[in-house]
Amino acid sequence: MPFLATAVVALFFQVSMVDLTRSSSVVFSGTVAKPHAALPSVPQGQNTAVVRVDDVLVQPATLNDLKSQLVTVRFRSGTSVASGQKALFFTTVYSVGKDVGLDSVGVVNDMPAEQGRAELAKARDVILDQDIAARLNRASAVVVGTVREVKSMATEQRISEHDPEWAVATVAVESVVKGNTAGGSVTLWFAGSGDPFYARWPKLKPGQRAIFIVQHEDPRLTFAQTRSVRKSEGPYVIDAADVQPLSNLDRVKRLAR
């Protein structure tokens, strides 16, 4: 029974870390400096607190280094924190200016930064498996190959500011992990636009050698197709997970079984 209980706790902890990691853009080890408070340029609320960042585990490159800085953290209703409390904070950014405001996704108490890094690495590994598996389940084919040519299919005529600016890549196929390809090459359509709506669409480049998880259907296609005069033909790469580095080949093969 003790072994079973330990296993269950470990399982739930890992699931929680995966969920927290997936939902967060800033993860740091910190100490609560002042509960029920906020830094001057961030509005104070009932659930805000000033927290000192002791060590940064994850943060966007667009933010200045937060290590050793004070930040305002806005906690979810029902979460209570105390002065001097040390924890691992999983957050997202809601205010950037003179001071930084972060929304709390979750808090793991009494976890040192080094242990947090190890747990984050495990969680990221699980997330990568989940993301690749989800794309493999939709895929019509999976190939290893090199992009030989990229051709823009964008037109000057626009019906929307969110035009995907279609582009087509010709990929020379070296090997096939799943499905069939004829003629030793595959043509992949993708959104070449830098519009935020297409931020997760891969942008293929000549000479790029990778694993391509080829898609024919995806809910995001409807949005793109209705905002373009040019009607795409497919197949596509649509999600960041659709293009994997060669270092993930064993992982992709395992998940494709």
Image: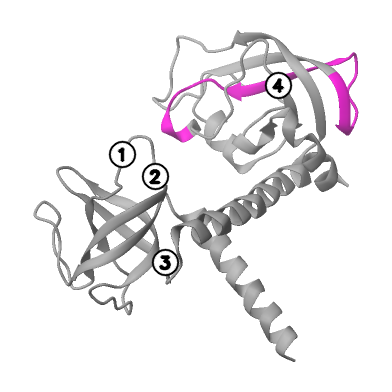
Q: Which amino acid does label 2 sit on?
A: Gln
- Local crowd size for mark 4, using a 10 Å CA cut-off: few (<14), some (14–19), many (≥20): many
Decide which of tag 1 and tag 4 comes sooner along the chain.
1
Q: Which of disc 3 and disc 4 is earlier in sequence?
A: 3
Q: Residues within 10 Å of mark 3 (few under 14, many from 20)?
A: many
Q: How far apart are marks 1 and 4 (CA)?
A: 34 Å
In the displayed structure, does residue 61 sit left or right of residue 174? left
Say if the magenta span includes residue 32.
Answer: no
Mark 3–mark 1 distance (CA, rounded to whole Å): 20 Å
Q: What residue type is labelled 3?
A: Gly
- Position of residue 1 measured from the top left corner of the image (x, y, whole percent): 75, 92
| Observer-nearest of 216 and 198 | 198
Residue bounds of the magenta highlight: 174-197
Instruction: Judge whether 35 appears above or below 121 on screen.
Output: below
Relative height, residue 161 to residue 28 (above, below): above
What's the colour scheme?
A: one colour
Q: How far apart are marks 2 and 3 (CA)?
A: 16 Å
Residue displayed at 88% across by 24% down: 175
Could you say which disc has been placed on residue 63 in the image? Answer: 1
Cα–Cα span, label 1 and label 2: 7 Å
Which of marks 2 and 4 precedes in the sequence? 2
Give the mark toward the camera: 4 or 3. Answer: 3
* Residues at marks 1 and 2 touching, judged by CB atoms closer than 8 Å: yes
Q: Residue 33 in the image: x percent, y percent?
A: 20, 66
The residue indicated by pointer 4 is 188
Q: Mark 3 points at which residue?
A: 106
Is residue 11 shown left or right of residue 1? left
**Figure quadrant of residue 209:** top right
